[in-house]
Image (cartoon, helix red, strand yellow):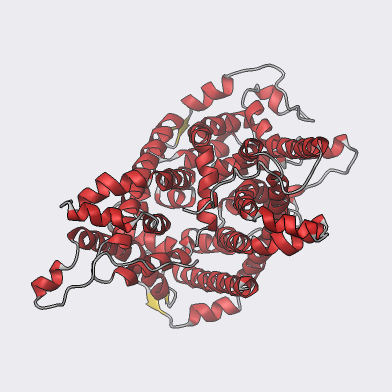
Amino acid sequence: MTATTDLARLSTPYWQRTRWQTWLLIAVLIGGGFVMLYPFAWLVLSAFKLPADIIRIPPTLWPEEWSLEAFQVVLSHKIGGGSLTRSYLNSLFVTITTVIAVLITSTLGGYCFARLRFPLREPLFYFVLSTTMVPFLTLLIPLYVVMDRLELLNTLWVLIVPSVFSSFGIFLCRQFVYGIPVELYDAAKIDGAGDFTIYTRIIVGMMKPVISVLAIFSFRATFNDYLWPLVTITDGGNYTLPLALRGIGNSFGWFDYSKVMASSLLTLIPPLIVFFIFQRNLVKGIALTGIKG
Amino acid sequence: MAVTAGPSPTDAAPVRSPRAWLSQYSWLGMGFAFSLSLFYLIMFVIPFGTAIWLSFNNWDYIQKPVFVNTRNFEKLLGDPGFWNALWTTVRFSAVEIFVALSLALLLALALSHLRPVYQYTLLAIYNLPVIMPGIVSVLLWKWLYRTNGGAFNAILESVGLPQQPFSKSPDQALWCITLMVVWIFLGNSSIVLLAAINEVPDSLLEAAQLDGASAWKRFTAVTLPLIQPAMAYQVVTSIIGTMQMFEPFQLMPGPGHSTRTLSLYTYQLGFEVLNLGYGAAVSIAMFVILLSATLFELQRRRRSWDY
């Protein structure tokens, strides 16, 4: 590993600067941060408003009276045979299953492509890499037909199955395994360990940094996905959160937006938890994937 | 992306019999390769092949597909809907990338002067929109853009500026979406650039300073050339990301077709008017355009950083 991911190298600045310049810079950046957070503040605060409060013109950012009414209403609201709670469970199930599957196939794939011998290894790898060039919208219609033939439409599996292998994940892991000294592999081999034992005992443990990065990316992509569920899921009982939000937007949108904000806020809880736990990994991960190669 | 070829774990044994041939390979590797191939066959090769095949047919999902040769592509060339969608996509993509990358560069440069603790904390704030599902951002901004009682119009009013129609106007709707998308991805882009800027060796910048280079000169002559690969990466991923973006255009559409992009047009042809053959043709055109744009950008950038 190079020091690519090391953001912590600026303790000795390359030019002289005064204290007040640094503070000015921080002040400007915090000001920009407030601009970034401004829309977010509307989301959070509006979720606690009463119907009469939210339609006020001109609007006020701060709730006149704090109320949990919007949350109570959306949690008991029916969305095409499902509910927000149901969508919550669906989303978590789909996301967790997909993330685990992607982590297994990617680490195993990275290991196989980097260290093991099998026919057509290189052509197969470049083929996997090239699939990322085709836009999802080109595959959307035919993939829908394939899922129809496999009778997976309108089940939660249709959201999981097409994402089980990740071209990006395999690429990332392969690059990472190349960074692990080959002597480790050879030594274990001489000690009589099988390929799979080497994978579970040695390789997986060394891949921790890349695994956390991949987990975040995969979580984000699956949890936030909108277009594919929109096309394949019609039964409200199988809605994921983005679809449920769309339903709530349609039923309350122009009457009482506090309901939309409340359900948005509930939706944001899992990503926020993941985000705050893994923020550092996310930063490192984006840097890692961005600069490598 | 440069992909390094890896060393093979062992030298190939001389091949004698099928059994000996097989024994030089790893069972785990072959098992993985088999399942991987099966997966990509079903999830990629067949759909992609079907897309190409469909583009030469007319199909409404109910009756049998009818072969129409290249008529879908001829229709595409004379279809104002297609050209309009392409133009909308290109305008959105170009402006978004230019604005987002400029802002991200400024942000990354500013952050690079701070201590890592501040870098991480501020990045967390700027990064917050990235983790939100796209539909949350769209529902939120749609509401802020409202003509009556929207937060943005309230701000305009409070500083004495005229009210704006925002998404209700065919001239402003696309830029309203663009601004939102910039807001979403700003933090993400600046992370990549910040990492690259932090990689610039201090010794080079010190040397330039000793030679009397101004801050601007140091930036254009030292920092900027050294972060070219990261910039190129940002541009390429942004091209791919913006050209395929879907949620904002479906959920926050402007009047008429003012914000109909290629991805929305493909979706509508396939799932709303059930013109699957023509939809496939438009999506193939989109693939070709995206591929050319990406390769062009990579080529252009590569020439400028081979030094």
Q: Position of residue B245 (x, y in %)?
A: 57, 56
In the picture, measured across the screen, residue A136 lies left or right of residue B207, that is: left
Vertical side of B151 occupied by A288: above or below? below
In the picture, measured across the screen, residue B22 lies left or right of residue B285, that is: left
Viewer-proximal residue among B290 and B70: B290
Vertical side of A55 occupied by B180: above or below? below
Vertical side of B212 occupied by A230: above or below? above
Viewer-proximal residue among A28 and A115: A115
Please tell me which residue is depicted at 43% across the width and 33% down the height of the picture.
A88
Total numbered badges shown on the rendered structure: 0
Viewer-proximal residue among A197 and A29: A197
Q: Position of residue A19 (x, y in %)?
A: 80, 35
Please tell me which residue is depicted at 29% across the width and 59% down the height of the picture.
A112
Q: Position of residue B76 (x, y in %)?
A: 56, 76
Residue A25 is drawn in which quadrant? top right
Q: Position of residue B141 (x, y in %)?
A: 67, 42
Q: List the single residue furthest toward the right.
A: B160
Please tell me which residue is depicted at 82% across the width and 35% down the height of the picture.
A20
Vertical side of B46 occupied by A54: above or below? above
In the picture, measured across the screen, residue A250 lies left or right of residue B9, that is: right
Can residue A2 be seen here? The reply is yes
Can residue B58 be seen here? The reply is no
Residue B64 is drawn in which quadrant? bottom left
